[in-house]
Amino acid sequence: MTSQRKPRGPYRKSAERREQILQAAYEAIDEHGERASLQDIADRVGVTQPALTYYFPTRDDLLLAVLERRDVMGKAASTGAAVEGASMVEGMAASARHTTNHPGLAKLYVTLSAAATDPESPAHSYFHDRYRTIASEVTRDFEEQQRTGVIRADEPAEHLARVVLAVLDGLQIQWMHDPTVDIAAIAETFTRMLAPSADFGREEKAAD
């Protein structure tokens, strides 16, 4: 029986250094948004600015790596709520709260996503693949929830999934313009609208 070996020597040190740089960039951008300088990131790690290019050849490479880490952290936040037995409503609210807790990263996401609509943008492939992957994951999740009666089944799961992504991105932009907007509460309101249509019918009859 063989066991997976951990990297040793220079390979392990190289991986550790890359992780240190990525974490420093994540923290710097979380604090200052896209304005965070490469020099600030290098200073946090204790390396020269040119040394950063060994691990991340361009600034775009580093920014995209930071966004990928943001995705992982955001997914962990919403998944954590689900693990604790929270509902879909609470899971979506947790994702929204993660956004407001990391304003610099949110600003980076919005800035790069707008620029990425240009096929020539270095971030184009990242956002194209990101939306396709997340939409597929949410669609599968919604299809299962439709089968179990958790959410309404009178609309295609794929359409509902895309609407959820649009709502989260739209709320993020509104919050950046006006931080008083409680996007977590609004996200909760929206997810309740995904309840089975029969529930709406009963509420309308009760109102009459």
Image (cartoon, rainbow, N blue to C red):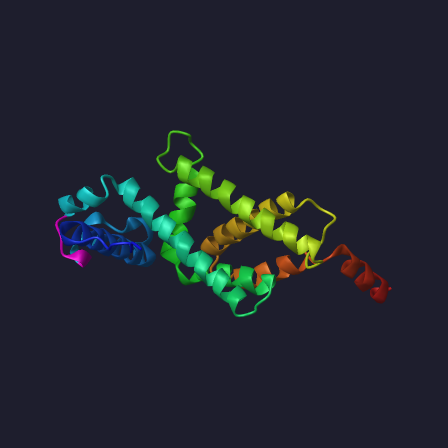
**Location of residue 87 by image quarter:** bottom right
From where the camera sits, is residue 182 visible? no
Q: Of 206 and 175, which appears nearest the observer?
A: 206
Q: Of 10 and 152, which appears nearest the observer?
A: 10
- Residue at 33%, 52% in the rendered image: 33
Q: Give the prevailing secondary structure in the magenta stretch.
A: loop
Q: Is residue 29 above or below residue 184?
A: above
Q: Is residue 47 magenta?
A: yes
**Location of residue 206 by image quarter:** bottom right
- Residue at 83%, 65% in the rendered image: 207
The x, y position of residue 41, in whole percent, is 21, 53
The x, y position of residue 43, in whole percent, is 16, 56
Quadrant location, the C terminus: bottom right
Q: Is residue 199 magenta?
A: no
The x, y position of residue 6, in whole percent, is 24, 55
**Left or right: 63 in relation to 103:** left
- Look at the image and give the residue range highlighted in magenta: 44-48
- Residue at 17%, 54% in the rendered image: 8
